[in-house]
Amino acid sequence: MPSGALLFQSVILGLLLGGLYALLAAGLTLYFGIMRVVMIAHSAFLILAAYLAWWSHARLGVDPLLSMVVTIPLFFGLGVLLQRLLLARLRPVTLTMMSVLLTFAIAVLIEGLLGYAFTGTQRRIQLGYGSASIGLFGARIAVVKLIAFGLAAVALLTLYLLLKRTRFGWALRATIQHPDAARLIGIDTDRIAGFGFGVGLATAAVGGTALALDTTIYPSLHWHWIGPLMAIIVVGGLGSVPGAAVAAMLLGLVQSLLQIPLGTTWAQTVFYLALFATLAFRPQGFFGGRLAQRF
Amino acid sequence: MTSRATRTSRATRGRRATALGAAVALLLAGCGDDGGSGSSDDPIVVGISLPLTGDFSEPGKGVQRGYEAWAKITNDKGGLLGRQVELKILDDQSNADRVVADYEQLIGKDNVDIVVGPFSTRLVVPAARVAEEYGMLFVEPAGAAKEVFTQGFKNLFYAAPAVADDHYNHLAEYLLALPPGQRPTTVAYAAMDDPFAQGTAYGLKAKLEAGGVRTVVDEVYPPNTTDFSTIAAKIAASRADMVVGGSQYQDGVNLIVALQQLRYQPKLAAFSTAPTSPEFAAAIGNKTEGILAPTGYTQKAPYPSNVEFVEKYTAQFGSPPEEDEANAYTTGQVVAAAVTAAGCAEQGECQQKLVDWIRGNKVETVVGPLTWDATGKPQGAHMIQQWVGGQIQIVLPTEAKEVDIVYPKPAW
């Protein structure tokens, strides 16, 4: 029987991990919501942002968090271009299927370019506060994990406010809910979809930076992430940002706690069990997300 | 093997048509003289099949450079038994079927005097089988896996200090020799689910458990694990005196940082592979002090032949040798010692004399003195290095140390 202290520590670690998962999955569910695009390259963009954060720290000496000043607008722009120039050209009938192939190609391309530019050597940002932690009732909270959690909270809150309180957000949600009706009331859905995709990719810039703070990165790392992230957005309900956030927190917590009795290998299967259970019993997802029903 | 595994992935990029050209050139060079007659003027022809193209081309070329350095250094000193050493290298294209044909050709058709091993465990076993059929001595520079030593080979010798399970032997000896009050009483193990990485940690675990040191955590994680915080939490909660990581690279680094974040302060921390990487200090910064790692080869090892090897190799190739080069050179040294002692180098009865001599003797090499058991498994252990004063230095065994081992290690 694990001690109370270990359980408490694991709950804290699980919540911190869940917060990171929520941030990393946010963009993924947004793309699907906006235009039924399965974006395999999302995690590759995360690693790209992580590399840019590492590079700006190692070569330019600036704090990795500052790299977001450049990467967020850059990724937003890339997202808009990606949607307008590539994804918008796919035929609507086969869009979901073909987007898997297209974004898979993009993922491989990014991985190859990262290997070419930075070599396959595994990198880690060396921060003065990398191993610092603060105490909380006997448990330790690593400063870098707390920063990552904070980034996730701010990014998700901003996304939420953007979607709920701005005209752009209303237009975007209208586009998500019913593109034809949105066009009828005068929304330029193509333009909105492009911006929406840009917003999704901008979350990858934040997520990648958060990831880089406390992980060793290498070009092929994204393959380890795409599976769990896909599971999270399906469990959360495809297209639902709050759903993905709740699913991410829950799965992160369960994974962390299951690791105590079961060990790492079996604890990882929680994502796939949850994915399987969701598809078998509630394909539209457990939290919101009416979109998947249309399949 | 770990470093080899990572190198293999890089190696796939290195396919070049030029490698084929190089192989042909070497083949022609090797054909200059038909060896095997055994007369005192003929060169001693050493036959080797190496992966010069394909998946293992990068480490394969490293092994090739090691053999070439050995041939040159030996010849510069007058050769073996007064005869020059000549290498005949074929390219097996990293293909196990090819490697069998290559050794058949080297022994049967080209009538070479000696054969030595190819690269990677996968290719060592089929190659050794051919050598065994022809009754040839087979010293090999790669193939640390258990399977190599369970095939019943009688002529095979692995020219390296130790197989994975024995990497930590010097550390186990040191710890068990400590007075009971200072000896660690509890140990936490975390190992990647990988035969090499896990082998190192479990080899130490078996020895410490036999010595009465209790195992309090025994975690195995899959190679794709990226988050080590909960494993670290389990280790920290156990308050083990010592932590041992059967790691490759990123897992070792991530686990060390996660342990530091939880303010876990063991008396000793030992991790395979990661701490010897040049990137390690760049990742962890000034928090490396006291971390231990086993290592099969280091340019700094004080063995007399190693000093000569590093100097002459660097002069020949422009950069110091790494582990692959050193393993090939070691193979050459073992063969040379046997040939010199037996006084012969040709096919036939001589081969058994060479095998018998190696079986019964100790050979001084660039990785230290080597001896073998009946299966050809080396009886040594890896040197233990520790981060002391901001750099990684040899601390065990005592006769090879650069500085004293620091135990208990300073807080990280």
Image (cartoon, grey):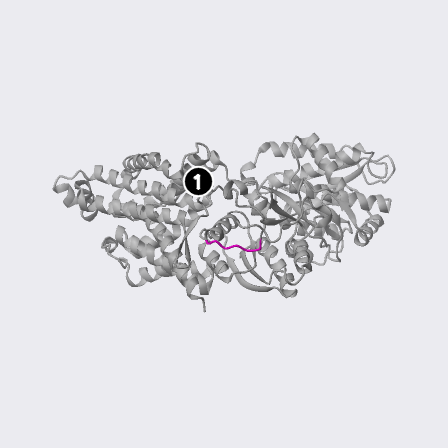
Most extreme residue toward the front is: B181
Q: Could you tell me which residue is drawn at 46 percent across and 32 percent down? A: A59
Q: Quadrant of the N terminus of chain A?
A: bottom left
- Residue B380 visible in rendering: yes
Residue B360: quarter of image: bottom right
Q: Nearer the viewer, residue A174 or B163?
A: B163
Marks counted in the figure total 1
Q: Quadrant of the C terminus of chain A?
A: bottom left
| Location of residue B118 in the rendering, given as x and y in whole percent from the top left corner | 68, 45
Q: Is residue B180 left or right of residue B334?
A: left
| Location of residue A69 in the rendering, given as x and y in whole percent from the top left corner | 33, 35
- Residue B150 visible in rendering: no
**Which residue, given by chain and number where applicable, does mark 1 sit on?**
A111
| Location of residue A254 in the rendering, given as x and y in whole percent from the top left corner | 37, 61
Q: Per the image, is A88 magenta?
A: no
Q: Is residue A79 left or right of residue B78?
A: left
Query: Which residue type carries mark 1?
Result: Glu
Q: Is residue B372 left or right of residue A86?
A: right
| Location of residue B293 in the rendering, given as x and y in whole percent from the top left corner | 61, 49
Badge 1 sits on which subunit?
A
| Element type where label 1 sits in the image | helix
Most extreme residue toward the bottom is: A1
Most extreme residue toward the left is: A185
Q: Residues within 10 Å of mark 1 (few under 14, many from 20)?
A: many
Residue B8: quarter of image: top right
Question: What predominant SS class does the magenta segment belong to?
Answer: loop
Magenta stretch?
Answer: B262-268
Q: Per the image, is B266 magenta?
A: yes
